[in-house]
Amino acid sequence: MSKLSILVISNDRSLHRFISRTLHDYGVSVVIAQSWQEGFKMVRENLFGGFLLDYCMSQSDPERVLHYMVNTPETAQLPFVLIIENKARVREHLKISGFADQFLTKPIRSENLRAKVQAMIDWTSMYRKTSSSTKNGIELIEFARVVRINRKSVQLTQTEFALLSLFIEHPGIALTRRSIIETLKEREGLESAVKERTIDYHIARLRKKLGAMGRKITSVYGVGYRFVNSHVGDSPYRFEH
């Protein structure tokens, strides 16, 4: 199996024991979170093969949890399975909401759990190979919106992640402010978040979060910004959109 762990979000201790025992025998490590808030925080800070969410503990506001899952980059692009009670109403609701193949019904059968987890890890491993890159100590995992510097996670906003990705794609090239703004609008749909008067603010915050690596993003007087790659000399060209 993969070295990727599975996150289990549940406050049901008997469920913890069952999943941990079943997946341990299958060669999968399990991390436990006692609440969905704690679990989603872990997803933002660590790379998992997928996560299992005990939907039953979220019945006070399940719609809020589902909305958060599908609208937050870190969770929306990571495979997950909802664990539900054997209730026809809940199952029908999830099917209508587009989660027809993403739930397990209690009591969970070991073979069903293993099949779901295997599918999640296979998908994550495949996607990670095609959307992960490491350059000069900065690792970008596109599908999970994860950034790591020297193996430590760095929390970036959607705009900051898009900026860093753009800079790394164009090492040594002076990018004009206008080209940066237009590219981010095309890729991310950030019409309102990125404007001429705010781009410097977003880049300043990105530099600060990157720590020493932030010095690789340098200002180019009268033009914009350049990402300095130690293996690529500064280009005399500028990138215009």
Image (cartoon, grey):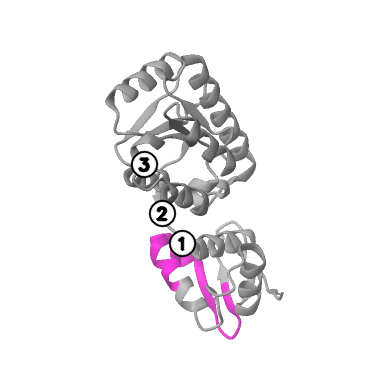
Q: Is residue 240 above or below residue 137?
A: below
* Three-letter code for the amino acid on which mark 2 is drawn: Val
Question: Given the current orientation, which residue lies at the most extreme front position?
Answer: 89
Mark-to-mark CA distance, 1 and 3: 29 Å
Give whichever of discs 2 and 3 has the lower sequence position: 3
Which quadrant of the structure image shows residue 176? bottom right
Q: CA distance from mark 2 to mark 3?
A: 32 Å
Residue 18: image location, x then y, percent: 36, 19
User: Can you say whether 223 is above or below 71 in the image?
Assistant: below
* Residue 152 spot, x, y in % from top left: 39, 47
Observer-nearest residue: 21 or 59?
59
Residue 198 position within the rendered picture, expressed as x and y whole percent measured from the top left: 49, 79
Q: Which residue is mark 2?
A: 154
Type of amino acid under label 1: Thr
* Magenta stretch bounds: 204-225
Q: Quadrant of residue 116?
A: top right
| Foreground pick, 165 / 113 | 113
- Which residue is the site of mark 1? 157
